[in-house]
Every structure is written in C-alpha cells, then in structure tokens.
Amino acid sequence: MSTHVVPVRVYIIIFLCLMVLTATTVGVAKVDLGAFNTLAALTIAVIKMLLVVIFFMHVRHSSGLTKLFIAAGFLWLMLLMAFTLTDVGSRNIPPQPEGWGASTVAPSPQR
Amino acid sequence: MTEAGAAHSAEHPPYLAHHFTDIEQQNESGTMGMWLFLLTEIMFFGGLFATYAIYRLKYFEGFHEGSRHLNYQLGAFNTAVLIGSSLTMALAVRYAQLGRRKALIAFLILTMVLGIAFIGIKLNYEWTADYHEGLIPWMGFHVEGANAAAVRLFFCFYFFMTGLHALHMVIGLGIMCVLLRMAAKGRFDSGYFAPVEITGLYWHFVDIVWIFLFPLLYLIGGLY
C-alpha cells in the first residue's frame, strides 16, 4: 500500500516514456527485421508494462509480500507460455532419421 | 458490553474495520486482495495470449495478412488515449492520498472521459470500418485469397480480445461512477482512499493488457 505520495513530475516522466515507447514500437514495425520484429515489439511491451507496474501501480513502494504475490503471478504466466509453446513447438519434430546412432560421425541429416 | 463497544469504536476511525490492527494493515490487505484478483485476470488473459501464440505460429502468413487489414494509426492513437487515462488515474489516486477532494473528482472525470473516448474510437471508427470491410466473422465476413480461413481466425482473436478488453473498460467506468458518488459525498480523506487506490490498480491492469494487444494485433504483420 502506498502511503508514500509520489511527486506529479514522476508520473509525467513515466507517461512521456510510455508515449516515446509507443512511437518506437510503431517505428520499429515499419522496418523489416524478420523474426526480430516480434521480439522488438514484445520487448518494448514488457518495458512499458514494467513502467506501469512499478510506477503507476506503486509496486516500488509496496510491501515485500505484495511483490512476492506479483512475482508468483508472472512466474505462473511464464509457465503457461513456456510449457504451451514447447509442447506445440516440438510436436512436428521429424522422427529419428535412418542410421542415427549407427555411427557417431554420420553427418546430421537435413531437417 | 456497550461501554466496551463505545470505548472500542472511539479508538479507531469509522472506516477501519474491526478485525484489522490499524489502517496500514487494512490497506495492505486490500491491495494484496486486489493483486490476487489481478493475478487471476493475468491467467485469464494469459490463456488467450497463449492460444493466440499457438495459432500465430501455425498460421503465420494469415495472421500477418489479417493484421495488415487493421488501421494501426487509430490503434496507436487509442494506445496514447489509454495511457493518458492511466496517467490521470494515477493522479486521481495521488490527490485521494492527499485528501484533495476536488482534484480527485476532476481527475476521475478526466479518466472516464479518456476511457469513453477509447471505447468511442473503437466502436465508431474501428469496429464500424471492420464491419463495412467485411472483416467480422459471422457478420458478412469476406476476405479473398489463399489465407482467407486464417485471416478469419485472426479476426476471431481480434474481436474476442479487444471485445473482452473493452468489456473490462466498461466495468472500470462503472466502478468509477461509484467512486465519483462516494467522493462527492465526502467519503474519502487522506486516511481512507483504498477504493480509489484499488480501482487504480484495476485500470492500470486494463492498460497493460492493451499495451500487449496493440503490437500483437496491429503491428504483427509489419508496416513496411
């Protein structure tokens, strides 16, 4: 709980940072970076989220227990994402190629 | 009994519930309870985002094609409006902390105006245009091309996710109406403003959901 009163200046600065990051994410989307477009968009979104959580939602001045709650929530979200995507991503791995294991010097077959 | 009761209520302000030691502990419990609710919301939206990730990996081209149908300028403008409403909400909480009733009411109204502007832009300029372009599944959807089915799936995600987000905003606006009434009645002071603080947490959460929705829906297809 925040009995701590944050100066208006801090809120304005965070707001301006969020605006700049929004413009950045649009700007980056105009450049073809291949797979890195998604990575850049998500990285910027995570930074914006952290700014909102830490400053607007006062987590900076929250108790340790509240911080632990939040960390646990994000850990669970990461578990959801990671296990879902590893499952889906590994479903179509081709079966063991012929000759696998027969010789350790065999060149790895084309996937 | 009555004597003890009277002595007890004299010890603490009326807004401090009986079972808390002091206002700090009451506020702490309220904040934590709200975060616990928000964590269930994170998992709720998280399931949608995970499903989105699966189908985007499966139908990469179709999702990109679908994304390019959306008006990213309006999306970006709405992002600015919503982040602006988060700023005004944060300031509303700040003035509630300071016990400045008029500033609290002014910033609550400003937050509601921005929230309504967001929904208005969405309804009036985006969803209406989507309808006329035939982008709404089950409502005259017509997109030609090899990826048409995947584009349709993208728009199912788009309307479900933005619709749920807008529903959360409408709920937030409803809660703010209650807050306005409470503030007008002078129910808050620098000692008691927990409802404002907790509504702020909810509003910022809704903002965060949009912070992820905007790039994943509007920008994922690339603007080049």
Image (cartoon, coloured by chain):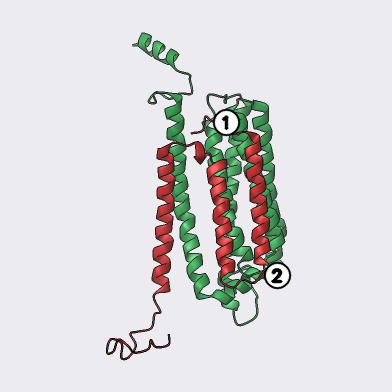
Chain colours: A red, B green
Q: Position of residue B183 (x, y in %)?
A: 61, 28
Which quadrant is the C terminus of chain B positioned in? Answer: bottom right
Q: Is residue B32 left or right of residue B133?
A: left
Q: Position of residue A12 (x, y in %)?
A: 66, 41
Q: Residue furthest front?
A: A105
Q: Position of residue B194 (x, y in %)?
A: 52, 31
| One can see residue B76 in this view | yes
Q: Check disc 2 and report the residue beneath it.
A: B133
Q: Residue furthest left?
A: A102
Q: As shown in the figure, which amino acid type bears the numbered disc 2?
A: Glu
A94 or A27, nearer to the observer = A27
Q: Disc 2 sits on a residue from what chain? A: B
Res B88 quadrant in image: top right
Q: Disc 1 sits on a residue from what chain? A: A
Which quadrant is the N terminus of chain B positioned in? Answer: top left
Q: Check disc 1 and report the residue beneath it.
A: A5
| One can see residue B123 in this view | no
Q: Is residue B157 left or right of residue B30?
A: right
Give me the residue at 42% from left, 73% from top.
A89
Q: Please tell me whether residue B89 is drawn above or below residue B187 in the rendered image.
A: below
Q: As shown in the figure, which amino acid type bears the numbered disc 1?
A: Val
Secondary structure beneath disc 2? loop
A57 or B111, nearer to the observer = A57
A67 or B194, nearer to the observer = A67
Q: How many marks?
A: 2
Give me the residue at 44% from left, 13% from top.
B10
